[in-house]
Image (cartoon, helix red, strand yellow):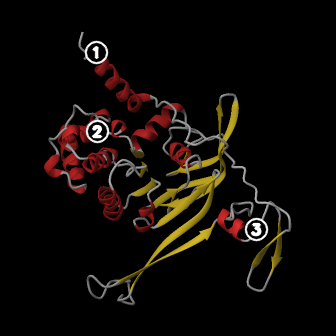
Amino acid sequence: MPEPNNILITCDNLVKIYKIAGLEVVALQGLDLTVERGALLGIVGPSGSGKTTLLNILGGLDRPSAGRVTVNGQDLIKLSAAALDRYRCNQVGFVWQQVARNLIPYLSVQENVELPMTVAGIRWGEKRGRAQELLAAVGLSGRRQHRLAELSGGEQQRAAIAVALANRPALLLADEPTGEVDSTTAQTILETFRRLNETLGLTIIIVTHDPRIVGQVDRVVAIRDGKISTETIRQVSQLERAMVGERLVEEGAAEAVTYHEYVVLDSAGRLQVPREYLEQFNIGDRTILEVTDEGILLRPVADRRVAATPLLPGLEEEPPAPRRRGLRGLWPRVRRRRSYDDRPG
């Protein structure tokens, strides 16, 4: 079934099971998610909840065990290995927490941005102009001839964003992009994502533990135990709008920003009640469901304790991403071999 034109990503009953030390670990269990084109989405959740697993699947770095995932009209499960390589190179941009996965240290900033275009066979003049445009967009025009060691942590991540956009992807995926910088720099990086989203109409998904993400994106989904648990929507009400076309009457008119949090029901009608609510009202592993005039009411059952066993026992971190194939997976190996060959004696 074709997706509506405004929907870029559809995840339907997505399941991912890893085998670790002879045990099966469920990283995603029936996750449902839709993302519109041009969305700026944040994904949050504790370690082991399935955030990075979802990002790896959307980026074509891993395949789900079951379910359906469609990105930009392509069913990723049905793509061949070669088609998946083309998808990663042309449709998706990646920004990782570790700088070593984003940039090659012995190249200048501009050369790093040009490299994906060189691999794609873009002509010299076109790639040079594209690189300069992207560096201007992330505020690094004056640093384009510098190398990695000459940049601050925030500048390195902004350079990584420019590299990720080199081949004009439809989707930008960022995994903990502010995890290794201070709070001021983190704010600058998040503002860069928002500016690119607004100016380029780019769809961006950011996985993070940073609580500031709520104020920088339009929508935040929380993943717990491999499923979407809650969703927070950012709504901006500009107090001085024209009635027609929603144009501002005066530039800089005041804005009232509100956030609405919702508990998400999956396709089978199941929901995850936040643990603090269960503990507050002493609701254990059974509950009484009542229909009232205002909605549905959950009542505790006497002598039923709160279930405390997590879905992913002992999995404190996400499973490692599978080794990438093709040219994108080649560069880290080239860097490691170069470092080995350059050792003294």
Query: Which residue carries the number 3 mark?
Result: 282
**Mark 2 and 1 residues: CB-CB less than 8 Å, in contact?**
no
What is the secondary structure assignment of the residue under circle 2?
helix
Query: Which residue carries the number 2 mark?
Result: 117
Which callout, 3 or 2, points to the residue nearer the camera?
3
Residue 188 appears in view: yes
Q: Position of residue 78 (x, y in %)?
A: 59, 39
Crowding at label 2, few (<14), some or many (≥20) Cα neighbours within 10 Å? many
Q: Where is residue 336, by image quadrant?
A: top left
Query: Which residue carries the number 1 mark?
Result: 341
Q: Position of residue 276 (x, y in %)?
A: 65, 65
Which is more toward the observer, 330 or 191? 191
Vertical position of residue 292 compared to residue 201: above or below: below
Q: CA distance from mark 2 to mark 1?
A: 27 Å
Q: Amino acid at mark 1?
A: Asp
- Numbered circles on residues, count: 3
Vertical position of residue 342 compared to residue 280: above or below: above
First-in-chain label (2 vs 1) = 2
